[in-house]
């Protein structure tokens, strides 16, 4: 699922709880994606709470962090990413360690994925979350960057 709320149940119209996600047969949630942060104005703190709750409820989580273009251009990428990551780690008290092989943390890159960015980032990331570029001919370059 691409989102979940931080509560078990209640009158939260439009939200889906981790329990509902599991009832549908899904095992993972994507939390903190840029659209949730910037379009829906979800704070770093809310993202951290959602990640902690989803993990505590037995879901795997793909926690998204990342800077906006103006932050990258201002040279504060590391600061922004550190702050977002710290809020998640401050909220999660018990990390499940066997969700994805021997390591529970994998790096997936999903920001402006292109053939060029994949070639540059491939050594440092485990996988790419490809959006619109999957509809372009250069998608082959993205696939080949990890082969």
Image: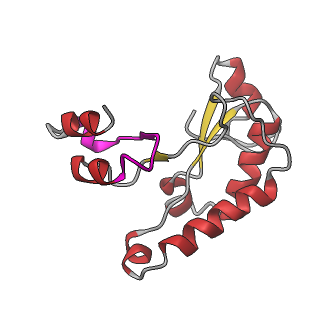
Residue located at (28% from left, 43% from top):
132
| Vertical side of 18 occupied by 53: above or below | below
Residue 106 appears anywhere in the view: yes
Residue located at (65% from left, 60% from top):
85
Residue located at (39% from left, 76% from top):
70
Q: Is residue 119 magenta?
A: no
Q: Which residue lies furthest to the right in this view?
A: 93
The percent coordinates of residue 15 (x first, y second) are 67, 40
Residue located at (78% from left, 47% from top):
52
Q: In this view, does 94 lie to the left or right of 116?
A: right
Residue 9 appears anywhere in the view: no
The percent coordinates of residue 123 (x first, y second) are 39, 47
Q: Is residue 75 left or right of residue 46?
A: left
The magenta span reads 121-135
Tell me, what colour scheme is on the image?
A: secondary structure
Task: Decide which of 134, 1 is in the foreground and name it.
Answer: 134
Q: What is the total number of numbered labels drawn onto the structure image? A: 0
Q: Which residue lies furthest to the bottom in this view?
A: 74
The percent coordinates of residue 64 (x first, y second) are 55, 51
| Vertical side of 62 occupied by 37: above or below | below
Q: In which quarter of the image is the C terminus?
A: top left
Q: Quadrant of residue 22?
A: top right
Q: Which residue lies furthest to the left in this view?
A: 137
Q: Is residue 147 left or right of residue 100?
A: left
Q: Quadrant of the N terminus?
A: top right
| Vertical side of 95 occupied by 68: above or below | below
């Amino acid at each position: 699922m691409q989102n979940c709320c931080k509560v078990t149940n209640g009158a939260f119209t439009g939200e889906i709880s981790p329990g509902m996600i599991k009832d549908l047969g899904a095992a993972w949630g994507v939390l903190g994606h840029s659209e949730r942060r910037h379009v829906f104005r979800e704070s770093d703190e809310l993202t951290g709470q959602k990640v902690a709750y989803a993990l505590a409820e037995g879901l795997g989580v793909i926690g998204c962090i990342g800077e906006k273009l103006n932050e990258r251009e201002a040279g504060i990428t590391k600061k922004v990413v550190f702050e977002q990551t710290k809020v998640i780690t401050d909220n999660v008290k018990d990390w499940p360690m066997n969700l994805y092989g021997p390591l529970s943390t994998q790096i997936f890159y999903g920001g402006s994925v292109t053939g060029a960015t994949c070639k540059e980032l491939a050594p440092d990331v485990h996988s790419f979350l490809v959006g619109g570029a999957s509809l372009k001919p250069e998608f082959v370059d993205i696939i080949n960057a990890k082969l």
